[in-house]
Image: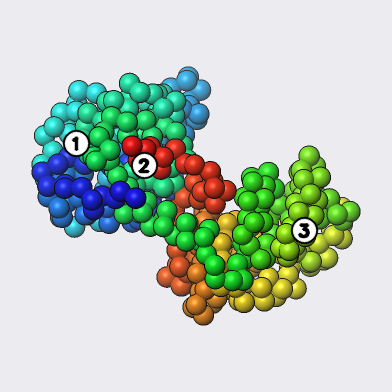
Amino acid sequence: MTTIKDINLEGKKVLIRVDFNVPFDKDFNITDDTRIQAALPTINYVLEQGGAAILMSHLGRPQKKKKEDGSIDMQKFTLRHVVGHLSSLMKGHIVKFAENTVGKDTQRYADELQSGEVLLIENTRFEAGEEKGSEALAKQFANLGDIYINDAFGSAHRAHASTTTVAQFFDPKQRAFGLLMEKEIKNATKALNSDARPITAITGGAKVSDKLLLLDSLLDRVDHLIIGGGMAYTFAKAQGGSIGNSIFEEDKMELTLELLEKAKTKGVEVHLPTDTKIADDFSNDANAKIVPTKEIPDGWEGLDIGPKTIEQFGHIIKQSKTILWNGPMGVFEFENFATGTESVAEFVAQATRDGAFSLIGGGDSVAAVTQMGLVDDVSFASTGGGAMLEFLERKQLPGIAAIEVA
């Protein structure tokens, strides 16, 4: 694996693909800067080595959320909102902003950039060619720097101009992974190849369809497979249970039964919720009660795992030596239905403190350990949801392949 530390950066302009796709409040204040913080080691390394850093990132999906007149909402999706906060984190280094993603002005900014300075260019997705992997756009990106570094693991599963195509315009010796990408790849690989058993995979989220490939691929590796969240109700329904108004995917029920049978033949223990916290409305303030998972009455829906399930899952997790967790156990954004997810976070942290290796992937899972102050008590919390999911499915990620190809 070629990393930024393998390249001489002195006097060079280093084009870095970062992931600054961060959330904002209505006044455009950043509400979670985890991804920006994660990019700092690579940016600071470039500056410490005498280079200049040119940063490019996407923010949201401006091409798919245009105004009624068909124009892009520049105010909502501009990376200018990031500049002030990034500047406060750079400890005296100048952070400049190019108002255009590419073009003469942006090229001039890059040409005039001095060692020790940082240039952030405008949202890559303002350009229609970004998500199409446009070679013409990628060439314009490449002209900005001498060296290309991909440090955006969260976008590594996208074959976009700034994540993948751009790499072909750099000599293999002048392109590499950033420090964050290196950590992401090494930790995900460690989790997949671990021999420390028992190995437990914890999966959650709303849809079985989002995780079927992951579940299937994990059956060759794990000893225990814990399934929670909305996806558990498809399993319950397929097994003949009554799930009321709970979310489920009718067209995936047969596949869930096949997965359970496959797990049995491979000696993998699958753990599904036995009790559920249900609500009479999809609301934090809805009436709630605990019932068996397969006995949810009409008019009610499952929003979290129940106390017996929490205890059962906890017993498995705390005995595990390798843990992969992707997806919440319930509607984590509702405080009254976050107990299952928070409990799993505590169990994973406890197991890690007792010597287990734990990899957390997915926004809600990482948010849980972060909000509970447990991020330092797990082995690694990934910045990539979809990318980590595909990596664990053993898919080749375009953003990684583009760096590694000779």
- Residue 371 higher or lower than 297, as above or below: below
Element under disc 3: helix
Q: Nearer the viewer, residue 380 or 391?
A: 391
Q: Which residue is mark 3?
A: 265
- Of mark 2 and mark 3, the one earlier in the sequence is 3
- Using a 10 Å C-alpha cutoff, classify the residue at mark 3 as few (fewer than 14 neighbours), some (14 to 19) or many (20 or more): few
Residue 397 circle label: none
Q: Which residue is mark 2?
A: 404
Relative to 51, 4 lies left or right:
right
Element under disc 1: loop
Tell which residue pokes out farthest to the front in this image: 406
Residue 260 position by quadrant: bottom right
Residue 316 position by quadrant: bottom right
- Residue 378 higher or lower than 84, as above or below: below
Contact? badges 2 and 3 (CB < 8 Å): no
- Of mark 3 and mark 1, the one earlier in the sequence is 1
Mark 1: which amino acid?
Asp
Mark 2: which amino acid?
Glu
